[in-house]
Image (cartoon, rainbow, N blue to C red):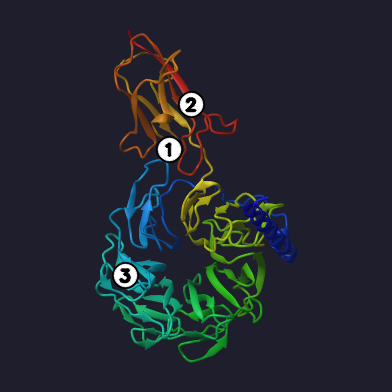
């Protein structure tokens, strides 16, 4: 046996052993329980059509009207996903904007977020407020203007805001703005930094949105890292009433603006207006050390969080039991849970991270592998078996899923991956809540029509927007296997619901023709044409007509 094959076999056996050991260790947790089949919100495991990037997406943020998805990370191009328009792409610089409806990048929104040769730029956080997109991370300039790790650009044209030029720095270390939260009057920032505009700020700060100046009275700080590495803040999230803010990250102590301090392991609650420490806390030792709080999502009664460092998990904590954040459930994973999000109806909690994509294996639902994505019951933490997409690479991939954004129709996933559920979709994927298959609802000429004009265009109307190419829509003379030469295209103004087949020359007179919409047509969510609801699978549609003499 060759050396390469021996190494491959050894690596496979090692991974299997690690997986078995990890499964034994967590067998008492939620992953070993046979969960409900599905939640009220149906969602496809296969991603729909959207453009993707040539590098990792670390941040996602919807526009205020919900029509645009802003993304940030470390990438230089947003491009059409094969095979529709090979080569179609937009050159960008670590941020981009995606049309939520079509999944296509906006070519006129391309702010240039740049760094230096020694310290290349990366975007870790985004926020949108009053027609501005706030950008946080580690960078030296935006649009050619000096900007130190925090900036604002116009939400419509991407031009840098000349009035907002903070300076975020870190003594003896590289600074990062990991978290941005836009309130009614303030922009709250969190990360790894020691100074903002020359003022001492330990990983937390706020800006007045009206004056674009640092808020001098909002001065909470984190300290005492849990484990290795300095303390940091990775996420900021409003409580449901917006009177308080939850902060997550790696820290053991938090001091409010008034100087009152308390132990807070990875999660703290602050008063929105004052920055004082709120008495609510998760009991010491529940999260433990060392630990990073990566992401949070809040309802009036629950705080859901993703965690990871040594003990990796997602968990729910009570917000309706006084000042004690009692743990309600815990879902253990074999890698960081880096992003969490609720479905619009609140029946699913989506979890994303590098669990199952890095070194260790894990499975749910009686053997289904976990690979970066899963959804659980928000009430119990039990995994739903109908949505367990597989992100690739599924080994030595420390990114996996890094950021979620949800709309009424889709869950967007940003991260570092090449495929999702076997479909090539690099670093940005859109999973549709829609499980409804499109149908042909009207055909022109109608099936069985006679005396049809020889110069007719063949029309197919669909129940919803569909995507197809020339090869999906064909016209044949009856008895012929060669299609009629024709141009196939969507009819303008119909939002891809009506498609026309325009023969390149007039049809023969007194002749039967057969029109076919073939397999391969889908609605962008991955739902294939389905003309017969009693059958399953991708189905073609056909009809015939006869031309006049």
Q: Which residue does the image show at 57% across and 80% down from the upper left?
A: 228
Name the spot of residue 275 as percent of width and height, x first.
Answer: 45, 83
Residue 508 drawn above or below residue 13: above
Quadrant position of residue 69: bottom left
Q: Callout 1: helix, strand or loop?
A: loop
Tell me the distance, in whole angstroms, between the alpha carbons under discs 3 and 1: 37 Å
Q: Nearer the viewer, residue 52 or 43?
A: 52
- Quick one: label 3 or label 2, which is nearer the N terminus? 3
Quadrant position of residue 94: bottom left
Q: Callout 3: helix, strand or loop?
A: strand
Name the spot of residue 402 as percent of width and height, x first.
Answer: 50, 63
In this rendering, position of residue 464 left or right of residue 266: left
Q: Dot 1: within a 10 Å radius of its alpha carbon, few (fewer than 14), some, or many (20 or more) residues?
A: many
Q: Is residue 347 visible?
A: no
Q: Which residue does the image show at 40% across and 52% down from the upper left?
A: 100
Rendered image: mark on residue 466: 1
């Amino acid at each position: 046996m060759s050396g390469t094959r021996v190494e491959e076999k050894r690596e496979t056996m090692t991974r299997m052993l690690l997986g078995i050991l990890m499964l034994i260790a967590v067998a008492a947790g939620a992953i070993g329980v046979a969960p409900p089949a599905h939640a009220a919100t149906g969602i496809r495991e296969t991603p729909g059509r959207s453009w993707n990037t040539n590098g990792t997406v670390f941040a996602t943020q919807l526009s205020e009207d919900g029509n645009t998805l802003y993304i940030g990370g470390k990438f230089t191009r947003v491009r059409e996903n094969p095979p529709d328009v090979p080569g179609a792409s937009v050159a960008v610089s670590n941020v981009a904007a995606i049309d939520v409806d079509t999944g296509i990048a906006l070519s006129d929104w391309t702010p240039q977020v740049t760094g230096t040769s020694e310290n290349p730029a990366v975007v870790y956080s985004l926020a949108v407020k009053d027609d501005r997109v706030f950008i946080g991370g580690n960078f030296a300039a935006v649009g050619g203007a000096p900007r130190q790790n925090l900036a604002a650009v116009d939400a419509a044209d991407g031009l840098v805001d000349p009035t907002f030029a903070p300076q975020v720095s870190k003594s003896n270390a590289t600074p990062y703005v990991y978290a941005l939260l836009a309130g009614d009057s303030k922009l709250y920032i969190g990360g790894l930094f020691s100074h903002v505009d020359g003022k001492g700020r330990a990983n937390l700060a706020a800006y007045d949105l009206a004056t674009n100046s640092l808020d001098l009275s909002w001065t909470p700080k984190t300290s005492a890292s849990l484990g290795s590495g300095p303390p940091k803040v990775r996420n900021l999230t409003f409580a449901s009433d917006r009177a308080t803010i939850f902060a997550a990250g790696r820290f053991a102590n938090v001091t409010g603006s008034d100087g009152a301090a308390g132990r807070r392991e990875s999660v703290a609650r602050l008063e929105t207006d004052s920055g004082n420490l709120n008495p609510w806390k998760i009991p010491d030792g529940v999260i433990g050390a060392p630990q990073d709080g990566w992401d949070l999502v809040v309802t009036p009664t629950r705080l859901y969080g993703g965690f990871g460092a040594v003990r990796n998990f997602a968990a729910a904590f009570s917000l309706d039991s006084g000042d004690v954040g009692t743990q309600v459930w815990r879902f253990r994973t074999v890698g960081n849970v880096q992003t969490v999000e609720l479905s619009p109806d609140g029946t699913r909690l989506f979890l994303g991270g590098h669990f199952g994509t890095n070194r260790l294996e894990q499975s749910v639902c009686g053997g289904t592998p976990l690979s970066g994505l899963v959804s659980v019951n928000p009430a119990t933490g039990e995994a739903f078996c109908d949505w367990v997409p597989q992100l690739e690479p599924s080994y030595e991939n420390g990114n996996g899923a890094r950021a979620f954004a949800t709309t009424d129709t889709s869950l967007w996933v940003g991260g570092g991956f090449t495929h999702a559920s076997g479909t090539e979709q690099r670093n940005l994927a859109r999973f549709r809540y829609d499980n409804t298959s499109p149908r042909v609802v009207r055909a022109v000429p109608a099936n069985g029509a006679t005396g049809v004009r020889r110069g007719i265009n063949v029309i197919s109307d669909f129940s919803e927007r569909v995507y197809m190419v020339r090869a999906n829509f064909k016209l044949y003379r009856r008895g012929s296997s060669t299609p009629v030469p024709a141009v196939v295209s969507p009819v303008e103004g119909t939002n891809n619901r009506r498609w026309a087949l325009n023969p390149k020359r007039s049809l023969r007179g007194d002749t039967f023709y057969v029109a076919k919409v073939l397999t391969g047509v889908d609605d962008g969510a991955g739902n294939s044409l389905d003309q017969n609801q009693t059958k399953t699978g991708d189905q073609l549609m056909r009809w015939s007509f006869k031309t006049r003499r």
